[in-house]
Amino acid sequence: FAHRKLRQLIKTPLLMTEHVRSLEPHIDFVIADATDYVRGDVGYDGITGVIKLAHACEALGLDIEFHGPGPAQRQCMAAIRNTNYYEMGL
């Protein structure tokens, strides 16, 4: 898996899975040790989907960051513990 090799070669944390849909492919990245953070998207998976992803990431010890600004993203951030950054569109 090329992302795992890249992660091993650099010191900068990687935030992957921005355009990945559904829970299983996201978790595949995590299990393959290919990312430091996971990107969730309310537009792709809905609120229920990203909350499930956030809980799975929390169980695996990773943070989730949300793609794009908006009220749905803010609501999701308020509902979970393992997120830190709010993405602002310029």
Image (cartoon, rainbow, N blue to C red):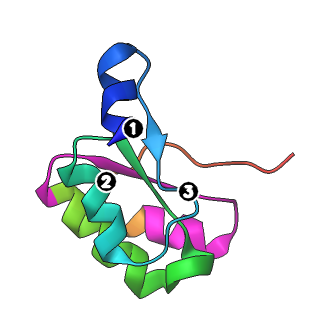
Residue bounds of the magenta highlight: 59-77
Kind of residue at disc 2: Phe
Residue 12's x, y, as percent? 44, 18
Q: Which mark is residue 29?
A: 2
Frontmost residue, 21 versus 6: 6
Residue to which mark 1 is pinned: 3
SS class of the residue under badge 3? loop
Question: Alpha-carbon distance for marks 3 and 1?
Answer: 14 Å
What residue lies at 41% left-to-right and 74% top-to-bottom? Answer: 50
Q: Which mark is residue 18?
A: 3
- Looking at the image, is mark 2 or mark 3 nearer the viewer? 2
Residue 63 lies in the magenta stretch: yes
Frontmost residue, 12 versus 64: 12
Mark 3 Cα shell of 10 Å, populated few (<14), some (14-19), many (≥20): some
Disc with the residue nearer the chain's start (3 vs 1): 1
Residue 42's x, y, as percent? 56, 75
Disc with the residue nearer the chain's start (1 vs 2): 1
Frontmost residue, 90 versus 30: 30
Vertical arrangement, residue 12 with respect to residue 27, above or below: above
Mark 2 Cα shell of 10 Å, populated few (<14), some (14-19), many (≥20): some
Disc with the residue nearer the chain's start (2 vs 3): 3
User: Do the residues under discs 2 and 3 have CB atoms within 8 angstroms?
Assistant: no
Q: Which image quadrant: the C terminus?
A: top right
